[in-house]
Image (tube, coloured by chain):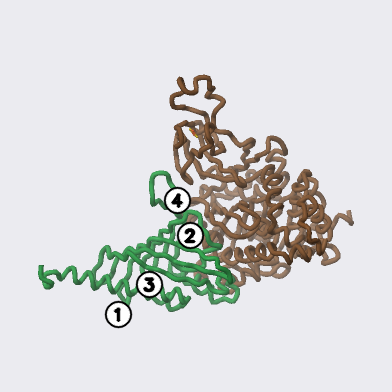
Chain colours: A brown, B green
Amino acid sequence: MAADDKPKVPEQAVQDAREALDEGFFPLEFFNDDDLHELEMERIFGQAWVFVGHESEIPEPGDYARRYIGDDTFIFVRDESGEVNLLFDSCRHRGAKVCRAEQGNTSHFRCPYHGWTYKNNGEAAGIPQKSKAFKELDREEYGLAHVPRLETYEGLVFASLAEEGPTLEEWLGDFKWYFDIHMKLPEGGMEVIGEPHRWVIDANWKTIADNFNGDSYHTAWAHGSVLDLELGGEETVGHAGTGESMDRHIHCDGHTTSIRGFEDEDVFLTYPEEVVADLFTKEGLSEGQWQVARQALSFTGGIFPNFGFLHFGDTTDDPNKDVAPFFTIRKWRPLGPDQMELWSWGLAPKNAPEEFKERMYKMYTSNFGPTGNFEQDDVPIWKGITDVAGGQFASKQGYQLNYQMGLDWMSEMDLDEEWDGPGFAYSENLEEGGMRLFHEQWYEMLAGNAREDAIGVPMNIKEER
Amino acid sequence: MKLSEREDELEQLLVEREVRQFLNYEAELLDERNLHEWFDHVADDISYRMPRRLMHENTAASFSEKGYYFNEDYGSLEARVKRFDSEYAWAERPPTRTERYVTNVVVDEYDDDEVQVTNNLLVYLSRGDSEDHSFYSAKRHDRLRRRDDTFELVDREILLNQTVLSTDNVSIFL
Ligand code: FES
Ligand SMILES: [Fe+2]
């Protein structure tokens, strides 16, 4: 596919991607292409389960927050009966936006254009001059539109713009086994602290998806400053494939998580002993999940397509202070082929002492978010990738990026056959299969196939099985 | 009124001038990325905060009660300063080019030890070898403490105007 001067139709480009992926390659140009972006919006973001927010962000009736799925604006709102809704923010009369703030509390949304008024469950409540002007109009049919599908998993609200397709339950599949560890470990669950950080960066959304789907290889290098300053321990930040920790890369039903920890030790992500003793509970967790939680020092992961999380222990904002954990969830919202808006939330166990929650939030902002000592250094890198992907050279040369780490002819990659959880667990973290899995699903959805076509036995062990 | 009868005003003017001189000097240190020298002017009981701006329907200036970008004490601020000495602090390699404009300096209160001052800050940022640039605009509430013939920063609250940031990261001090 080198030296093809004609602009490639996306369909063909997508076909090429499939073949390249089998060899562990992905074309650089795919990180910045207008046509592919359009296709992604339609076939991925128009179909997938996309994260909206956590229920704890809108605890009271009338609480709302403006949220986005791809290019569409919604109101994430708890109605008077306590139900969570996701309403399309467009008046049924002439389409004006009825929600003007980023968040707030209201019983009604009033359209500024001609005054149609909607209850916070979307129902049309008032139409000025109705009896004269719209006498035949049935109010019941003219409420704000609800997103076709809205589902909640452990307080995390996801929506799909598609009327049909897999349920959220099916979409997450067995990966819930891993995510439950985070959400169910503390009695009372997790809650969001404050409001999400939002910032717009000139980078393609797939660059961050790559990173969260198992880039253990970058940490010691990209985040060397954190190591230098001793703000994070060697086992949290250090090189993939080295160190004393037990490292696992897990691929499960299209989603991934990287785990570092210590075998047969009570680590519990360095949560303080009181929190572990008072709040952490085996209830809702299997023995295997409890074991993972107990031994874990850090988790990174991605839920396809645009949800990521980090639950890290052993970090600090100051080398003279004790280490503490943080937990962040995030989404990357594409704004164009070369731009995304990052959304990032800090969480803490709901029933933890207030002081400790503040400490956890502090650990989050010190490490991640726009000011984070880690994240400051990630973002400009993703921007650079997007930049070089957008030029002529990448497409003219058919410039391929190497995702071969962990493929059987590149390195010895063993599966941990003893592993208790679902999916495939690699016995170390020097592999890039999570990213290949991400791109495989990207390929299948863009090609108009079911995402599940990509989910099965990881590529590098297909032959052996 | 004779000048001699306006002593209070004169004193206030002098304090204002001292404060302005200090804020300008501080801006210069930060623009030159002379971070260690800047940190020499940070008091060991510093509280340095940048709360998250909210966008509410009826209030122009509302800020999160729990959410922030910065909430630093002496140790965490020092760690941030020292981190930029690391050759791996990629966000600032090469350093952001900045110009800070400190205006609307109003001394709210003062005594022999401390001055409470409100000021506006506009920071022009330029990165990379493109025409790309960005701005931060903020109101600051600062408390300065006299030390020798200069000041040290005891308390700073940075009230940014943006609710969605338009930069890759915040790798500078405001
Ligand atoms: S557009 Fe909303 S009332 Fe007319
Ligand atoms: Fe990173």
Q: Dot 3 corresponds to which residue?
A: B43
- Work out whether disc 2 and disc 1 sit on a shared chain: yes
Depth-wise, is mark 4 or mark 2 nearer the camera? 4
Q: How would you rate the neighbour count of disc 3 (Cα within 10 Å): few for under 14, some for 14-19, many for 20 or more? A: some
Residue A421 appears in the picture as rendered: no
Give the percent coordinates (x, y) of residue A419: 77, 54
Note whether A212 is above or below A93 in the view shown.
below
Q: Which residue is mark 4?
A: B54
Depth-wise, is mark 4 or mark 1 nearer the camera?
A: 4
Chain of the residue on which disc 2 is drawn: B
Marked residue nearer the N-terminal end (2 or 3): 3
Q: Report if the CB atoms under discs 2 and 1 are less than 8 Å apart.
A: no
Q: Disc 3 is attached to a residue of which chain? A: B
Counting from the top left corner in percent of width and height, residue A324 is at: 54, 61
The answer to whether mark 4 and mark 3 are in CB contact below 8 A is: no
Q: Amino acid at mark 2?
A: Tyr
Marker disc for residue B149: 1
Q: Quadrant of residue A48?
A: top right
Q: What crowding class fits label 1: few (fewer than 14 Cα within 10 Å), some (14-19), or many (20 or more)?
A: few
**Badge number at residue B69:** 2
Label 4 is placed on what type of residue? Leu
Asked if badges 4 and 2 are on one and the same chain, I answer yes
* Spatial separation of the CA atoms under disc 4 and disc 3: 29 Å
Measured from the top left, where is residue A362 in percent x and y? Answer: 50, 59
Q: Is residue B20 left or right of residue A276?
A: left
Report the Cα–Cα distance between label 1 and label 3: 15 Å
Query: Mark number for residue B37?
Result: none
Q: CA distance from mark 4 to mark 1?
A: 39 Å
Say if labels 1 and 3 share a chain. Answer: yes
